[in-house]
Each structure stands twice: as C-alpha cells, then as structure tokens.
Image (spheres, rainbow, N blue to C red):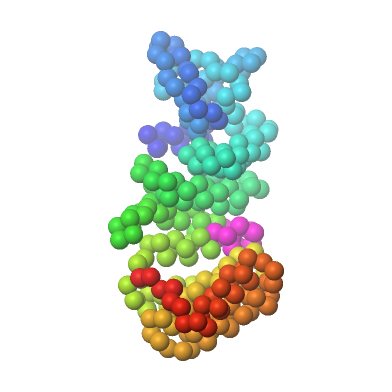
Amino acid sequence: MIHALIILILSANAGVVIVDNVWFYGNDHKMRILTTGDMVEIVEHINETVRVEYDSATGELNRNVLIDLNEEIAEDEQFVFARGYFDEGEYVKSARLLDIFTKYFDDSKYLSEALYYLGQSYEALALKGQSDSLPGFSFNDKIEQAYYNGDVYKILVNAFPDSPFASKAEYRLINIFRLGHLPWLDSVELIQQELTMWDEFCSKYQNTDEYPLGLSEKGHLNRVLFEITNETNYKEEAIVIFTEITTKYPNTVHAAYSNVHLFEIERGEKIYKY
C-alpha cells in the first residue's frame, strides 16, 4: 500500500484530496468516501469537475475538493491548506498533507517549514493518543506517554542548518530525548547527558528565539542536579544562568520564569520530582 502511494505521488497526474467526506462513485458502481490526504490519479479536467482514478475505479469529483499537484499554484496551495489545518488543530489532516508535500515538493522553498510543522503535527498526534497507525512513534511505559521520535526534525537540521526552523527542530529533538528517558530516577549521568545537549544547543543558536529557552533548560537541569547531588557548583551555575536571563531578557516571560527559580533557590525549595 505504501509502495503504491509513493508511485502515485510521483505520477505525472497525481492529485490530493484536501477535505473530508468526499463521496466518490466509480465506474464499478461502488461508492467510496475519500478523506483529506487521499491520493488520486487525474485522468481529465472537465469544466468544474475532474475525472480521476482511485482504487482501480474511475469517476468524477468537484475540482474544489482536490489539488492537481502539477498545476502551477499547487505548491503554494497545498502548503496553505496544510498550514491552515495545523493552525486549526486538525493534526491528522495537516500531517497527511505535509507528508505528501515533503515528498512531492522536495525542492520547495517552503520545505524546511513544512518539515518542522510535519514534526509538530506528529508530536500533537502523539499527545492526543492518535499515533497508533503512524510510523516513527514510541511509548514510554513509565510515564504512560506516546512520543514521536523526531525523524523529520533530524532531516530538517541536517538538510537546512541555516534555516530559522533548524533551532526550533533541534529544540524539539532534545525535548523528545527527555520524553524518552523520563523518569530520571536520580540518574546523574542521564541528566548530565541532556545538559551537554543544551550546552551545545546554546552555543550553536545564540541568535535565535530558542536561545533563552535553551538557557532556561540549562538552569533547570543544574538546579535538579544540585538537589540530587547537593554539589553547590550546580546551584551556583543555575543562579548564574537565571540571572543572565533576567539581564538579557527583562520584561519577558523568560525573565519571570527565571525570577521564580531564583526566588525558590534562595528559599531552598525543591523542584525535582523523579
């Protein structure tokens, strides 16, 4: 089935359905209901309808329920629909359309953004428990949470290191690493491994919106390590990091978050849960 889908995507006459509940009556006198992301082979354009082939049957569909992937505007049009579904929280639809987009328009100027939102769609489906039929998902039995393995984020970071979405993708990859390893169970080595990732992240992406988020994660993990080990160097490093955030990003939520941490550290409050 997957092999057939790939062949159809690469077909010179491919089309993709962009809405749900599309009734398709084929020449075999059978009714089928198509959904967003279903692929058809376009046979002929006829005024306001399109003759298509689907599931070895031919029939007609209204032109406004699909995109002809070979039309001049198809790249822009499909990206708009896919992003629109994501923004509306329709993650199954956005995932299906973005997956097709990244395969068919693999040299698109929108590709790095499409890969990022494909990853975001997959993560949202995992959180909603809707990822059972999709590849690339794992389940952390200890915290009873499904999570996406981040494959498209890895593709994005490797293929588009200078894209504004590279830092966003790498930020998600480190969070995915954490999801796969919680609970920490006092594993200093595991927490230090993640801390090293955040160190490298902050060195690499100093001029991005994700930089203060990375700093916050560094401060958080240093605070956790102090609570586990009682080694004051971790506490001191956390204070330095949170103070840096309040200085560099005053009057922001990052500063507010850091001020809360500094207040709690001063009072000796604990945050470590695992």
Q: Residue furthest bottom?
A: 232
Q: Which residues are magenta?
A: 157-170
- Nearer to the camera, 212 or 3: 212
Residue 33 visible to an observer of this rendering: yes
Q: Residue at x 52, y 71 (%)?
A: 217
Q: Quadrant of the C terminus?
A: bottom left
Q: Determine if residue 193 is in view.
A: no
Q: Residue furthest front?
A: 267
Residue occupying image coordinates x 63% and y 79% = 244
Question: Which image quadrant: the N terminus?
Answer: top left
Quarter of the view holding residue 46: top right
Residue 54, compared with residue 233, is above or below; it is above
Question: Which residue appears farthest toward the left when viewing the image?
Answer: 141
The verdict on residue 159 being magenta is yes
Q: Is residue 70 left or right of residue 3?
A: right
Q: Position of residue 50 (x, y in %)?
A: 58, 18
Residue 72 versus residue 268: which sits nearer the camera? 268
**Above or below 188: residue 23:** above
Q: Nearer the viewer, residue 204 or 68?
A: 204
Looking at the image, is 250 positioned above or below residue 8?
Answer: below
Across and down, in percent, residue 168 comes to: 58, 60
Q: Position of residue 213 (x, y in %)?
A: 58, 67
Q: Residue at x 58, y 69 (%)?
A: 257
Residue 232 left/right relative to 67:
left
Q: Give coordinates of residue 86: x percent, y percent.
A: 56, 43
Q: Residue at x 38, y 70 (%)?
A: 273
Foreground pick, 180 / 203: 180
| Residue 165 forms part of the magenta stretch | yes
Count all numbered tags in the image, as a single digit.
0
